[in-house]
Amino acid sequence: MIELKTLFIGAPSIAAFSSLLIALRSYKLAKKAYSLSENTYQFNKDIAENEYIIRNSKPYIEIYNRELKSIKKVTNRLSHLLVSINSHLGYTFESYQNSYNKENGISKHLRHIYDETHELIAKSFEDELSYQTPENIYSRLSGFKNINIGIDLERNITGNEYKSKQIISNIAILTNSINDADQKKLYKDFIDAMKKIVEFIVSIKGDIESSMKNLEDGLSDNQIENFNLQENYELYKLYKQLLIFSKLINQSEITAIEDNPYLPISTIIYYGSNMHILNEVLLRVSFRYWK
């Protein structure tokens, strides 16, 4: 009788335990189904958002690709001129070098000092070149056109991070290494060397202005649309980079070089830095990357 009673007591326990297992299994299956449903919903939502962005980005992709192709037709020639003329200017400094470097224990060649100087200036703007307005960049870059070496070195350029002491020191070396009488000849050689790049930029300016207008019109049209181009951020960055490049060319003072033998040597540095900056942005545009 005891064994039979135990048997009858155990049966409900087994049934309850089985029900618990079934309930747990059902819960896990339901949870898994819910999770799959959530994932499916998110997946479908992501697809819908991507389709929305791609569909609405299409007109701007077309504008970007069209203007990029137009600008890239001239970039190889432009890049070659920017680099070769800057290199030539370094050797021009050396051709008029006096004994200042030797007397002051300066071992660097003037061409290396010239290259280092315009590279340092361009590097100080490097982080801004993909987003800062050309107006802002050129406004600050123009500070190099007429450097007062004594005053700028004495001030130690406090609060003016893009005019480092090294840059001003290099400009001082370049200035002191050329005799006053030879500075006129140096500047004339500079004007002659710049003629090719001036002529080339003048020849492409109409096409550059056309591309700039088309890119700007695209951004203006986007302002009154429900779709914000920045939702496609990669495209927006490249689009803006191309627009900045066209503006940097259009607003450059390279084509307005003055045939004046009395301008300071820092003016040559200013134009060399302008050419270096143009080539830096040109390379970013050509290889479609944002830095």
Image (tube, rainbow, N blue to C red):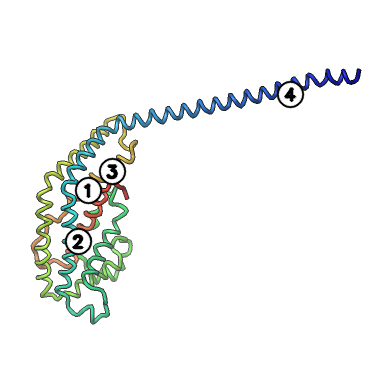
Which residue in the protein does label 1 denote? 245
Q: Of callouts 3 and 2, which one flags the residue occurring earlier in the amino acid sequence?
A: 3
Left or right of residue 291: residue 214: left
Q: Neighbour class for label 4 at 10 Å: few (<14), some, many (≥20)?
A: few
Q: Of callouts 4 and 3, which one flags the residue occurring earlier in the amino acid sequence?
A: 4
Which residue in the protein does label 4 denote? 17
- Badge 3 marks a residue whose secondary structure is helix
Which residue in the protein does label 3 denote? 238
- Of labels 3 and 2, the one closer to you: 3
Give the alpha-carbon distance from disc 4 to disc 3, as whole Å: 64 Å
Give the alpha-carbon distance from disc 4 to disc 2, as whole Å: 85 Å
Q: In which quarter of the image is the N terminus?
A: top right
Give the alpha-carbon distance from disc 3 to disc 2, as whole Å: 26 Å
- Badge 1 marks a residue whose secondary structure is helix
Say the numbered circle drawn on residue 271.
none
Q: Of callouts 2 and 1, which one flags the residue occurring earlier in the amino acid sequence?
A: 1
Q: Which residue lies furthest to the bottom in this view?
A: 103
Q: Of callouts 4 and 2, which one flags the residue occurring earlier in the amino acid sequence?
A: 4
Q: Residue furthest right?
A: 1
Q: Is 49 located above or below residue 133 in the figure? A: above
Q: In which quarter of the image is residue 263?
A: bottom left
Left or right of residue 14: residue 281: left
* Type of the residue with mark 3: Leu
* Type of the residue with mark 4: Phe
Decide which of 124, 1 is in the foreground and name it: 1
Name the residue: 34% across, 36% down: 231
- Residue 178 position within the rendered picture, expressed as x and y whole percent measured from the top left: 16, 74
